Amino acid sequence: MYLGLQKGKLLISEPSALNDVFFNRSVILLTEHSKSSTVGFILNRPSKYVFKDLIPEINCDFTLYEGGPVELDNLYFIHRIPNLLEGSIEVTKGIYWGGNFNQLKSLLNKQLIKNTDIRFFLGYSGWNENQLERELKTKSWFISENDYDNIFEVDEETIWKNKLLQKGGKYKIWANAPRDIQMN
């Protein structure tokens, strides 16, 4: 098992992934890691849709994020409100995955949940046995601590850049590269 690879960590795409359409500049929260698979959600890829676009009977305008390229037609969520959602699975201190969807719908309709307490994703990022370890060895990613007090309040426009600056060295140069490297 790759050192440091565990749920609750952040997976940061390397600058070398600039040609990867889906994972370019992505920051992924790992929600599950075992010998056979790894699952996570891209934190900095907001979609053009809001929750009520997907489920109109729920009056909620929270942004939907692109969680990854797997099962794009499924809705997933991570949150900080396990006391309100039965069946929540702890990912790391203060962050939970899933829970009772009927309770969630009721809470959203009553507007009892803030967008700083939950994030919704269409799809997820997933790797099978040893796949992510191989990608780490080929420098497609690096692992970082989730050192944010509230990951749901982090600016998705700057999180990737800030993680590169935090890593230092050659990453400082890449942190300021334009999104389209050909524009340089």
Image (tube, rainbow, N blue to C red):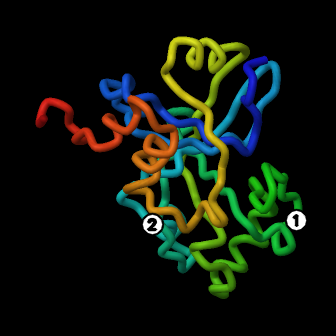
Q: Position of residue 86 (x, y in %)?
A: 88, 65
Q: Residue at x 40, y 47 (%)?
A: 161
Q: Which mark is residue 158?
A: none
Q: Residue at x 75, y 23 (%)?
A: 3
Rendered position, 128 above or below 176: above
Taking the image as shown, residue 163 lies to the left or right of residue 132, namely left
Taking the image as shown, residue 184 lies to the left or right of residue 149, namely left
Q: CA distance from mark 2 to mark 1?
A: 24 Å
Taking the image as shown, residue 3 lies to the left or right of residue 43, namely right
- Residue wearing tag 1: 86
Circle 2: residue type: Val
- Residue wearing tag 2: 50
Q: Residue at x 49, y 21 (%)?
A: 140
Indicate the quadrant containing the C terminus: top left, top right, bottom left or bottom right.
Answer: top left
> At numbered mark 2, what does the secondary structure look like: helix, strand or loop?
strand
Tell me which numbered mark, 2 or 1, is placed earlier along the sequence.
2
Query: In front here: 166 or 140?
Result: 166
Q: Position of residue 119 (x, y in %)?
A: 59, 61
Q: Say whether marks 2 and 1 touch (CB < 8 Å).
A: no
